[in-house]
Image: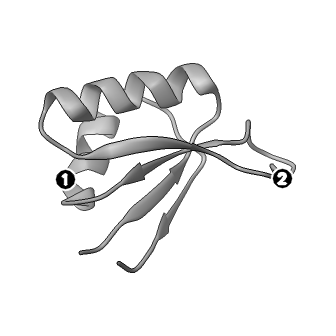
Amino acid sequence: MSVCIVEMPSYTYAVKGEKLLRARGYPCEINRKERPGGGGCGFSLVIKRNYPEAIGVLRAYSVPYTNIREGGD
């Protein structure tokens, strides 16, 4: 199973994205970074399945994000 880590600009957008995706059947969760870098709020959204489609949902509903990292299992 592939996962995707979507770095969010704020906790509020992380929650909005999580609720939006879960309501549409995409398993995801909010993770807090231990040491946020200089350009993010320290929260990310981990999408656990069908992440290309899930990213499309975030874009369609204008939920901003700062970076996308593809992961492994």
Q: State whether residue 43 is above or below residue 70.
A: above
Please state if 25 lies on the left or on the right of 31 as rendered: left
Residue contact at pointers 1 and 2, CB within 8 angstroms: no
Crowding at label 1, few (<14), some or many (≥20) Cα neighbours within 10 Å? Answer: few
Residue at point 50% right, 33% down?
Answer: 64
Furthest-left residue in this view: 25
Amino acid type, residue under disc 2 in the picture: Arg
Which mark's residue is nearer the viewer, 1 or 2? Answer: 2
Does residue 61 appear anywhere in the picture? no
Alpha carbon distance from label 1 to label 2: 29 Å
Amino acid type, residue under disc 1 in the picture: Glu
In this view, the residue in front, 20 or 61, is 20
Please state if 19 lies on the left or on the right of 36 as rendered: left
Q: Mark 1 points at which residue?
A: 53
Q: Name the residue under label 2.
A: 35
Estimate the x, y position of residue 43 in percent, counting from the top left. Answer: 63, 40
Which quadrant: the C terminus? bottom left
Estimate the x, y position of residue 54 in percent, counting from the top left. Answer: 25, 48
Residue at point 40% right, 63% down?
Answer: 4
Residue at point 64% right, 28% down?
Answer: 10
Mark 1 vs 2, N-terminal side: 2
Does residue 39 appear anywhere in the picture? yes
Q: Find residue 19 and name its label.
A: none
Q: State whether residue 31 is above or below residue 48.
A: above
Please state if 21 lies on the left or on the right of 39 as rendered: left
Estimate the x, y position of residue 14 in percent, counting from the top left. Answer: 50, 31
Q: Could you say whether the residue bearing mark 2 is in a helix, strand or loop?
A: loop
Furthest-bottom residue in this view: 72
Q: Could you say whether the residue bearing mark 1 is in a helix, strand or loop?
A: helix
Estimate the x, y position of residue 15 in percent, counting from the top left. Answer: 46, 24
Which quadrant: the N terminus? bottom left
Q: State whether residue 16 is above or below residue 73.
A: above
